[in-house]
Image (tube, grey):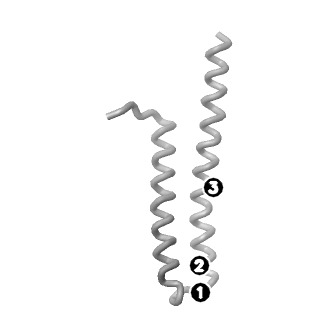
Amino acid sequence: MGKLDGVRLKIDITASIDAISSIHLLRVFMDLQDLRNTKLFGYVVFHLTFVVSALLASYLDKIAIAAHREEKQSH
């Protein structure tokens, strides 16, 4: 088993949540005739919230890692 730090674990968990949400959204799209437009819109917004939060978390971790490297190099 490889080394697993907090950053990598957080990225893996958000990717897993996004994958589960994608599968659920696909299932919802398969049964569109039984769904109202407002409920479908809610599912899409809910999924996009997961995707955007995962992207933001990854970006913030990238910034934090870069700042940490700069700090190490200055010492």
* Mark identifier at residue 71: none
- Please tell me how crowded label 2 is: few (under 14), some (14-19), or many (20+) other residues with Cα within 10 Å: some
Which residue is disc 3 drawn over?
A: 52
- Which amino acid, by three-letter code, is at mark 1? Arg
- Indicate which disc, 1 or 3, sits on the residue closer to the N terminus: 1
Residue 35 drawn at (x, y percent): 54, 86
What whole-number distance in Å separates the C-alpha atoms at marks 2 and 3? 18 Å
Helix, strand or loop status at disc 3: helix
Helix, strand or loop status at disc 2: helix
Write down the quadrant of residue 67 in the picture. Answer: top right
* Quadrant holding the N terminus: top left
Residue 51 drawn at (x, y percent): 59, 57
Q: Residue at x 41, y 34 (%)?
A: 4
Residue 27 drawn at (x, y percent): 46, 75
Residue 9 drawn at (x, y percent): 45, 41
Q: Residue at x 63, y 32 (%)?
A: 64
Given contact means CB atoms under 8 Å apart, are the residues at marks 1 and 3 in contact?
no
- Which amino acid, by three-letter code, is at mark 2? Leu
Write down the quadrant of residue 49 in the picture. Answer: bottom right
Given contact means CB atoms under 8 Å apart, are the residues at marks 2 and 1 in contact?
yes
What whole-number distance in Å separates the C-alpha atoms at marks 2 and 1? 6 Å
* Mark identifier at residue 36: 1
Helix, strand or loop status at disc 1: loop
Which residue is disc 2 drawn over?
A: 40
Q: In this view, does 56 lie above or below 69?
A: below
* Quadrant holding the C terminus: top right
What whole-number distance in Å separates the C-alpha atoms at marks 1 and 3? 25 Å
Given contact means CB atoms under 8 Å apart, are the residues at marks 2 and 3 in contact?
no
Q: Is residue 65 above or below residue 24?
A: above
- Please tell me how crowded label 1 is: few (under 14), some (14-19), or many (20+) other residues with Cα within 10 Å: few
